[in-house]
Image (spheres, rainbow, N blue to C red):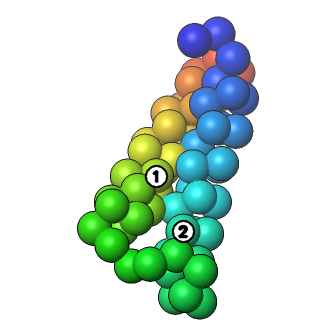
Amino acid sequence: MERPVYLMIIGFILLVIGVIVPLLMITGVLETTWFWNGVAIVAQISGLVLGLAGVGMYMASRR
């Protein structure tokens, strides 16, 4: 991927989803199920990995 900024943006969006889904479960908007817990965990982990990969690619391209 030529644009590491895209990876950072996608990672940020996934991290936000990973925070919003548990908040919706706590407030009672979403029912607490294995599916929504899995979505939150996968979104957080993949967002973190994509964001760090984007930052690494960005730093490597700046050198």
Residue at position x 44%, y 78% in the image:
31
Residue 6, labelled with which disc? none
Where residue 62 appears, as percent x and y from the top left, is 70, 21
Residue at disc 1, secondary structure: helix
**Residue 27 appears in the rendering:** yes
Q: Are marks 1 and 2 in contact (CB under 8 Å)?
A: yes
Q: Which callout, 1 or 2, points at the residue further toward the start of the chain? A: 2
Tell me the amino acid under the disc marked 1: Ala
Residue 43, labelled with which disc? 1
Image quadrant holding the N terminus, namely top right
Residue at which label 2 appears = 21
To which quarter of the image does residue 33 belong? Answer: bottom left
> Most extreme residue toward the bottom, as rendered?
27
- Separation (CA) of disc 1 from disc 2: 10 Å
Front-most of residues 46 and 30:
30
> Most extreme residue toward the top, as rendered?
2
Image quadrant holding the C terminus, namely top right
Residue at disc 2, secondary structure: helix
Where residue 50 appears, as percent x and y from the top left, is 50, 37
Residue 3 to residue 32: above or below: above
Where residue 57 appears, as percent x and y from the top left, is 57, 24
Where residue 9 appears, as percent x and y from the top left, is 70, 39
To which quarter of the image does residue 49 belong? Answer: top left
Tell me the amino acid under the disc marked 2: Val
Left or right placement of residue 15 versus residue 32 in this view? right
